[in-house]
Amino acid sequence: MRLDLDHSSGEPRVFRREGDRVFIDAGGLHYRELNGMVQGATREDVREIDIENVHGHPYIGTGLRKSLRIRVRGDAGDDLGAFMYGPDIEVEGSVGRGLGNSMSRGRIVVRGSAGEGAGTGMKGGCILIGGHVGPRAALHMQELWYGRPVMVVGGTAGDLLGEYMAGGVVVVLDLRGGSGKGSPRGIGSGMSGGAIYFRGCLRREQVAGEARLQLVKGEELGEVTVWVHEFARLFGEDTEVLLSGVFTRVTAAHT
């Protein structure tokens, strides 16, 4: 199998272009072949890439610096959208570890769940996850001059959510009441900036001792309501229901 395959040498059944849209069948491709095709397509006048039969392929969209739409049909692997600056990626299934690692701009929508370390070092853009997110999500999330990173999770989160978080916003809607995933612990450990909003009431023992928690009503969420509205639009939820209860806001103790 050739691992240096560029999109231009892909067979018609694997790589097909129709106008400004590209279709890739990843079913029999090594991840390096697939990502070579994606990178090659972005160097041309392409606005949308549709990838089907994705089965754990890692690094999709990693390092891309172009405004275009990528649709992933299947379950993607690790580091989807890492270091990206601009693309809009939608995954119909779930993803592995390191989702949006160090991304600076763009949007990622995941219909399923995400693994460990989602949003690690995230500096901008937004990630919306319909299911659960694994432990250590938003690790080292930070806020720079060009934007505020945002992550919205429809399910629940794993332990150490927002560990060493220095900026940005995380919203956990806990729509499925944990679904057997248990209650996250160590929320906001080492946190120095940003804010975590958890729908419902967190217990003091779930939050790191150095973090501060406060109950707020839906109407007091300010700009966060914009992201709740966006999540509801994408995933078919009722915004009024999502905002009808209380949220626990977790921030650094010194803020």
Image: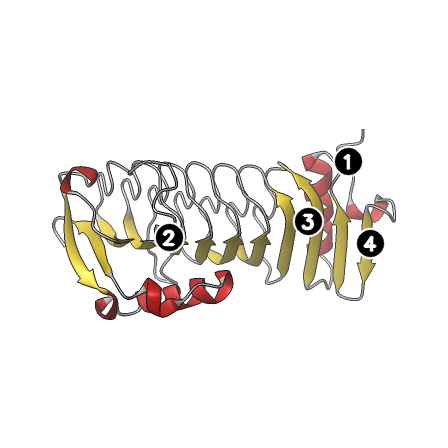
Q: CA distance from mark 1 to mark 4?
A: 15 Å
Q: CA distance from mark 4 to mark 2?
A: 39 Å
Pointer 4 residue: 16
- The crowding category of the residue bearing disc 2, from other C-alpha atoms within 10 Å (few below 14, some 14 to 19, many at least 20), is some
Front: mark 2 or 3 = 2
Pointer 3 residue: 39
Front: mark 4 or 3 = 4
Disc 1 marks which amino acid?
A: Gly
Disc 4 marks which amino acid?
A: Arg
Pointer 2 residue: 175
Image side of residue 193 versus residue 54, left or right:
left
Q: CA distance from mark 4 to mark 3?
A: 15 Å
Image side of residue 162 versus residue 14, left or right:
left
- Dot 3: element: helix
* Residue 245, image x, y percentages: 25, 62
Front: mark 4 or 2 = 2
- The crowding category of the residue bearing disc 3, from other C-alpha atoms within 10 Å (few below 14, some 14 to 19, many at least 20), is some
* Residue 43, image x, y percentages: 71, 56
Q: Nearer the viewer, residue 242 or 82?
A: 242
* Residue 77, image x, y percentages: 58, 37
Q: Earlier in the sequence, mark 4 or mark 3?
A: 4
Image side of residue 235 versus residue 142, left or right:
right
